[in-house]
Image: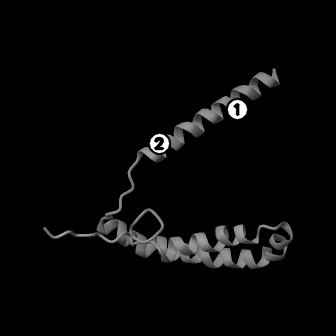
Amino acid sequence: MTRKISRTLVATLAACLMAFSSLGHAQAVDETPSALAMTGDAIFVRPALLATTIVGGAVYLVSLPFSLLGGNADEAGEVLVMGPAKATFVRCLGCTRTGKKPETVHTSN
C-alpha cells in the first residue's frame, strides 16, 4: 500500500517539475522594462537585494570555518554573497536577468 502511494507521489512530483520547467523556458525575458518596472526595481528590489547581500556576507563569515572543513567555501560564497551582489549591482534597472544589458549594435547602410 505505501509503495503504491510512494510511486504515485514520485510520479506526480516528476510531472509537476517537468511542467513547471517547460513553462519557465517558454516565456520570453523582457529586456525593455517599463518605467513602472524601473521605479519598482530602484525603490523596492535593489534595497532588498543589498540587504540580502549584507546578510549573506555575515552568514558566509559565520559559516566559513564549517564550509572550509566541508570543502564548499567557494560554493557558499557564490550562493550567499556573489549571487545577491550580482543581482544588486550587475543588472540593468528593471531587467529580470542578472548581467549587463548587451549593447545595441547599429549598422549604417
Q: How far apart are marks 1 and 2 (CA)?
A: 20 Å
- Estimate the x, y position of residue 34 in percent, counting from the top left: 30, 65
Up the image or down, 24 lies above or below 5; here it is below
**In the figure, is residue 94 to the left or right of 66?**
left
- Estimate the x, y position of residue 105 in percent, counting from the top left: 27, 69
Within-10-Å neighbours for mark 1: few <14, some 14–19, many 20+: few
Within-10-Å neighbours for mark 2: few <14, some 14–19, many 20+: few
> 5 or 18, which is in the foreground?
18
- Estimate the x, y position of residue 40 in percent, counting from the top left: 40, 69
Give residue 82's quadrant in the image.
Answer: bottom right
List the residue tagged with mark 2.
Answer: 23
List the residue tagged with mark 1.
Answer: 10
**In the figure, is residue 101 to the left or right of 108?**
right
Q: What element carries label 2?
A: helix
Give residue 54's quadrant in the image.
Answer: bottom right
> 8 or 21, which is in the foreground?
21
**Three-letter amino acid code of the residue under disc 2:** Leu
Q: Which residue is drawn at 20% across and 69% down?
A: 107
